[in-house]
Image (cartoon, coloured by chain):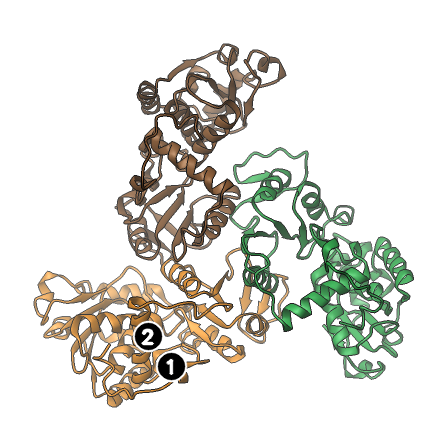
Chain colours: A brown, B green, C orange
Amino acid sequence: MSGPNKGRKTRDYPLLELRGRSFCSTGDFTREELSELLDLAMKFKTVGHGQPLAGRGVALIFFNPSLRTRTSMELGVAQLGGTPITLEVGSGTWSLEWREGVVMDGTATEHIKDAVQVLSRYVDAIAVRCFPGLKSWEEDRNDPVLSEFRRYSKVPIINMESSLYHPCQGLADVLTMHEALGSLDRRKVTLAWVKHPKPLPHAVPNSFALGCAQFGMDLTIACPPEYRLSDEMMSQLETQAGTSGGSVRVINDLNEGLTGAEIVYAKSWAGLPFYGDPEADRTARAAYQDWIINAGNMRLTAKRRFLH
Amino acid sequence: MSGPNKGRKTRDYPLLELRGRSFCSTGDFTREELSELLDLAMKFKTVGHGQPLAGRGVALIFFNPSLRTRTSMELGVAQLGGTPITLEVGSGTWSLEWREGVVMDGTATEHIKDAVQVLSRYVDAIAVRCFPGLKSWEEDRNDPVLSEFRRYSKVPIINMESSLYHPCQGLADVLTMHEALGSLDRRKVTLAWVKHPKPLPHAVPNSFALGCAQFGMDLTIACPPEYRLSDEMMSQLETQAGTSGGSVRVINDLNEGLTGAEIVYAKSWAGLPFYGDPEADRTARAAYQDWIINAGNMRLTAKRRFLH
Amino acid sequence: MSGPNKGRKTRDYPLLELRGRSFCSTGDFTREELSELLDLAMKFKTVGHGQPLAGRGVALIFFNPSLRTRTSMELGVAQLGGTPITLEVGSGTWSLEWREGVVMDGTATEHIKDAVQVLSRYVDAIAVRCFPGLKSWEEDRNDPVLSEFRRYSKVPIINMESSLYHPCQGLADVLTMHEALGSLDRRKVTLAWVKHPKPLPHAVPNSFALGCAQFGMDLTIACPPEYRLSDEMMSQLETQAGTSGGSVRVINDLNEGLTGAEIVYAKSWAGLPFYGDPEADRTARAAYQDWIINAGNMRLTAKRRFLH
């Protein structure tokens, strides 16, 4: 991956500085480190990988159902020689409580703190999927479940989609764009909000936007005014774009947002002003029936490349 | 397995023509191919097998609960060196919708089409268990879930019991009969309908009957008139018996059906005239309280060999 | 583990007499055999273990949810080279009926007898977790589910916590105490009943007490009169203490029970007089609000060593 990887110094011990670190958001890593991860991924894919996880256990904790992530993670861990331990929280099995003050009265419920401390002794890494509750933004904005895992784990935490981030997806999207465009610097990409029957989490658009900003792209976020990403996110995007030489802007008009885009990424997400109130979100969305991507508005883009 | 395998030509590349094919019904394979499969199974059992699935992933999708099939499939894949990925559909985890027109409104539900296309990229084969709904024969007769898997998968589909067939069980039954009788050609076998508290699926009797017909046996199906197998099935049985040199007949009297049988296979199944109406089926069954296999009527058979 | 292992004879074939035996209670094994197991565990931990389970399958049957036991068992079997098959009974998947007379009317339910006989043919050992129903002591005192597994299995049964015993935990507690104290003979240990919001099973205190008695410790059980362990258990403890040279006594006063203890193990459990009646148990417990372990009463002990 020579494109996004420009300026990387030769190292005798590649990935040395990544060992032991959690992977919770691409924002925790420099562009150079992420590029090295992508290089390694490509090497695994093309040259092969051996069994670097031989004798290792990786817990895969799912607070939410999953097909793709579960299958690819179980298979990935096994093919690298490790043992995946899949645990589904809540669905008839056992449940985990992340709020420290809450008194447990059932035998099937325990605090994340205890669970994570124990798991840390058994396995070499813990991967977690924990969607937001979509009830309270004050709660979800702190990524409470993932935060507790990070706080109490003695082994690296891998985020398989949390309230705020989906870094594996975000990095895969960077790779896909790199394969389509080559160098990503100053390439025009539009993240377009589109209508959907339900208010959806921010993790995927957040991590997509972050990847674009970290790899020096000129990112346009096209969305109705009520569907702006969070202030924390916007500020993070601007900082990253400043570092990478890219840019970020928000446009409240879909056609204007699509014009000249080399890549369009369509996604729906909940409006923060209506967070926890699906009815109010539905009412707001009703005014944006024309926020869809079709052959007509794709003509406004530069190359008609569409990701979904 | 020299008995059922007579007439097989020597081949330099055994099983070459089976590579990449789905295993959804024994009816999709010639007797020679099935015999070769059984030979290979016996060789694995007696001589050993190595790790032919090393580096391969096999998805095991269960729309319905399972103990035997799940345990034997997980263990089988692992012992051949592969990685089984078990996914339970619906039970608190995620659900799959096979009807193309249906609009998804939940995050946990997706169309089989999307799921299968993704799985096809991750794994090397997909095994599926999908019982019939037992509500509508018009629906179940098309084996809708299995059909969608076949339609969208780019890797082989293995049927772990669908609406219409249970080919692994059917082939195992052929092997059991071969071990008991030697050559199966023109051996008298009776598939006897017996009473049961509930209307049950046709997959097991269908695949048993099909195996008998494909291996040249003289098959008697003993059942009350309302419990005839489907017309499609009967026609398939007659075609296969014609090819194999066997025969198939239906007898509406249990004692007459048992007389002279070298093997009796007892099984209950739903009456097609009452499909989707368990109450009507119960009323019909009430007239057939004496459709049971016991020491008395087993005396009518030739060898008192009983499978269940 | 030279301490608890004193008097062990040299053997050419270590563990030979353990091969093929079930591990349902430490009480089924001599102190010498348990010491050998612990020696082997320490050797695995320090020297390494190879792949003694290569090609073997182990079914892990969970009637109840589990995090620690499930993770450690799956990982343990895999790291020793075997294939763990995890089956969760009841939770949306399938259920097992242990009462022989009960008529099955659903396709998802089957008798343990059939299930265990089939599993015995597939796997090399069956591990079971089956908590008590906590409804009827007459039922739970016979450890009905575990008993059926033992009765019908042709391969060893491993108890991952049943109605009456948790031998893996009990043996681990012995190891922990040995690491803290060296030789366990005549060491003073107190099993202290403490209050808890709910009546809890006896398996953990039973197996802890049994381990103490089997390894020659001077065991004090401190509990209110209504919370005495069962008569069967007390009689077993006395027999084991007689064999090992240890002792066992019950004290109905917490402070007196703690005085001079070298190790305190705090645990709550249901009162047998109120078994199946949580309300009556709650009323009884209300009189024992001061049955807690704190810095104050830990001063009465000899070394302030506390296990939980």
Residue A46 can be seen, yes or no: yes
Left or right? Give the position of A147 relative to B283: left
Q: What SS does tag 1 mark?
A: loop
Residue shown at 42% from the left, 45% from the top: A63
Q: C136 or C209, which lies in front? A: C209
Residue at numbered disc 1: C15
Residue shown at 21% from the left, 88% from the top: C245
* Position above or below: B216 against A18: below
- Chain of the residue displaying label 2: C
Q: A267 or A264, which lies in front? A: A264
Q: B243 or B188, which lies in front? A: B243
**Image location (x, y in percent) of residue A295:** 62, 16
Asked if the residue under mark 1 is in contact with the one under mark 2, i.e. CB atoms within 8 Å, the reply is yes
Q: Which amino acid, by three-letter code, is at mark 2?
A: Leu
Residue at numbered disc 2: C40
Q: How many marks?
A: 2
Q: Which amino acid, by three-letter code, is at mark 1?
A: Leu
Q: Residues within 10 Å of mark 1 (few under 14, many from 20)?
A: few
* Position above or below: B288 against C188: above
Q: Residues within 10 Å of mark 2 (few under 14, many from 20)?
A: some
**Image location (x, y in percent) of residue C103:** 62, 70
* Position above or below: B299 against B108: below
Q: Quadrant of the N terminus of chain C?
A: bottom left
